[in-house]
Amino acid sequence: MTYDELIPVIRRLALEAGDRIMEIYNSDDFEVKSKSDASPVTEADEAADALISAGLRAAFPDVLLITEEQAASHAQSGDTFLIVDPLDGTKEFINRRGDFTVNIALVENGTPTRGVVYAPAKGRMFYTRADGRSVEESGALDKEAPGDLTPISVSQPDNGALLVVASKSHRDQATDDYIGKYQVQDSKSAGSSLKFCLVATGEADLYPRVGRTMEWDTAAGHAVLAGAGGDVVRFDNHQPLTYGKDGYANPFFIAYAPGVDLKEA
């Protein structure tokens, strides 16, 4: 598998999954179940997972695949693997808020190197090209032929007037306390991996996450942010956030544009 082979496949699968998700989203009703950890799962999660998994296994049968909906059945990951969250922001989906995304990423030696984040209800798609640089695609989002690609890059932040984005469904006092360490011009809330993309495009400078996430929640957004010149570090020691961890659980983290004067936890 080369990057030139990978990118068209994950872009197309994200769009196809987005279509299936929107069919269910726009229906009169859809089923919501609870997983073993009490988090919600919908038929859209399951349909998108099946579609993406089948596509990736057909295209890259020799590459280990980790998906949120099938994680319990996986052996521990190796050095290289594909990781998928077919519908990140299930609570946003259930509440019809639109801030949900399809996420597909490639992890190599603990680092997400390529990825796609597609927000079908918002018509925004972000991904890394084969050369590793991140773009936002606009236009018809045709499955076979990319439209206009705009290179994206992080901001040059003003530490006296930072733009902060935080979780919409999981924001808490600990998050607000940490944000309070900075001089903030504006703070907004967003759901799902879109927060990484807002930092990647320069629409925000800083995204702190003081709460539980899993690797499939963050890998694609992490790849897009890295390809736009940004970084993601652990909250506790500011060391790089790595992947392939036991159980796929992330520590708290900070995604940011270099130039932000990071504060201690």
Image: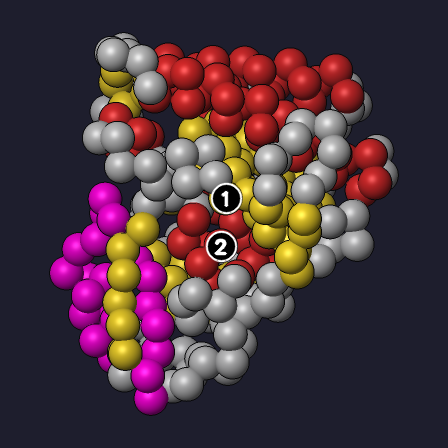
Apparent side of residue 140 relative to residue 218 in the rendered image (left or right): right
Does residue 70 lie above or below 121 as drawn?
A: above
Residue 179 at x, y = what percent? 26, 71
Q: Are marks 1 and 2 in contact (CB under 8 Å)?
A: yes
- Report the span colored magenta: 160-181
Three-letter code for the amino acid on which mark 1 is drawn: Arg
**Position of the C terminus by quadrant:** bottom left
Q: Residue at x 59, y 46 (%)?
A: 138
Q: Considering the image in quadrants, where does the N terminus appear?
A: top right
- Which residue was labeled with disc 1? 124
Give residue 207's quadrant in the image.
bottom left
Say which amino acid is labelled 2: Cys
Q: Is residue 241 above or below residue 15?
A: below
Q: Label 1 to label 2, Cα distance in Å?
A: 10 Å
The one of 210 and 225 positioned closer to us in this rendering: 225
User: 77 or 180, which is in the foreground?
Assistant: 180
Q: SS for tag 1? A: strand
The one nearer the camera, 190 or 81, is 190
Q: Is residue 106 left or right of residue 162?
A: right
Residue 259 is inside the magenta segment: no
What is the crowding at mark 1: few (fewer than 14 residues within 10 Å), some, or many (at least 20)? some
Q: Disc 2 marks which residue?
A: 197
Is residue 88 among the parts visible in the rendering?
no
Q: Position of residue 120 (x, y in %)?
A: 46, 33
**Residue shown at 77% from the left, 21% from the top:** 59
Q: Position of residue 12 (x, y in %)?
A: 66, 28
Image coords of residue 189 (percent x, y): 27, 55
Q: Which residue appears farthest toward the front when viewing the image?
A: 139
- State the residue lying farthest toward the left: 173
Q: Tell me which corner region of the image, top left, top right, bottom left or bottom right, holds residue 159.
A: bottom left
